[in-house]
Image (cartoon, rainbow, N blue to C red):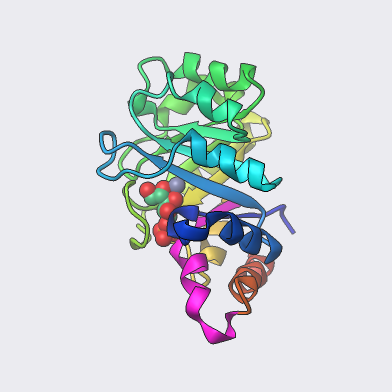
Amino acid sequence: MADFKIAPSILAADFAKLGQEVDDVIASGADIVHFDVMDNHYVPNLTIGPLVCEALRKHGVTAEIDVHLMVKPVDRIIPDFIAAGASYVTFHPEASEHVDRTLQMIREAGCKSGLVFNPATPLDILKHVMDKVDVILLMSVNPGFGGQSFIPETLNKCREARKMIDESGFDIRLEIDGGVKVDNIREVAEAGADMFVAGSAIFGARNDKDANGYNTVVQKMRDELAKAKV
Ligand code: DX5
Ligand code: ZN
């Protein structure tokens, strides 16, 4: 089976007990903490910054932290997230004046770098920077909010990105973000993704009596992924 990674988005966590939420979701078998940064400028919502990333590290979180920047501009804030313990830093190409420079800045600081593509943004810009990305993140909703529905056209874009990655020969993850649930994760994997962000689908299980914390929903996602024909 492919090396699939499940990345719960803490946007849907209970922020009043964030450290415990992250501990619980990692204990349930999830792999990576997806950390959504919104600035009320690039997207119409406002969330969390480097201080919260640092607080999770100080709390003892050792899992990789996948910082998804939905901010504009990006360059000023990137070093702060790297100092705060980010593992991945991804940004939207529309939010940087110099995409190649920003990617280099992330890599040179020792982090994994990536570009994020909104539903209507074509993949063209990747062509000349395939050697500078560790992850390609495809938005399957418009950025700004959790709990939206998966946009099916993303599956076509996913197949296109998978082809580009395979033809490039580089070791690049293909991540999907938005509306991923137990009932569509297999289809997304079959379209070529290997890293799956899920916010409401995972943290929304918190009040489900049969959920056994987050174990059941994460296990159901793994079961679906095990069935994927890739
Ligand atoms: C949206 C964020 C997502 C979001 C996903 O702008 O980038 O990471 O939290 O949430 P769900 O899984 O609820 O669509
Ligand atoms: Zn995200």
Where residue 62 sits, quadrant-wise, is top right
Residue at the far bottom: name it. Answer: 209
Front residue of 101/208: it is 208
| Drawn side of residue 60 relative to residue 93, left or right | right
Percent position of residue 217, x then y: 58, 73
| Drawn side of residue 31 relative to residue 156, left or right | right
Q: Is residue 215 magenta?
A: no
| Rendered position, 8 above or below 124 | below
Percent position of residue 149, x then y: 34, 63
Q: Is residue 198 magenta?
A: yes
Magenta: main secondary structure equals helix
Whether residue 163 can be seen here? no
Percent position of residue 145, x then y: 33, 53
Q: How many numbered badges does the structure rendering display? A: 0
| Residue depicted at 62% across the width and 68% down the height | 218
- Locate the C terminus and report the quarter of the image it occupies: bottom right
- Locate the N terminus and report the quarter of the image it occupies: bottom right
| Rendered position, 26 above or below 76 | below
| Rendered position, 1 above or below 160 | below
The part of the chain drawn in magenta is 195-211
| Drawn side of residue 9 relative to residue 195, left or right | left
Front residue of 117/95: it is 95
| Residue depicted at 60% across the width and 42% down the height | 65
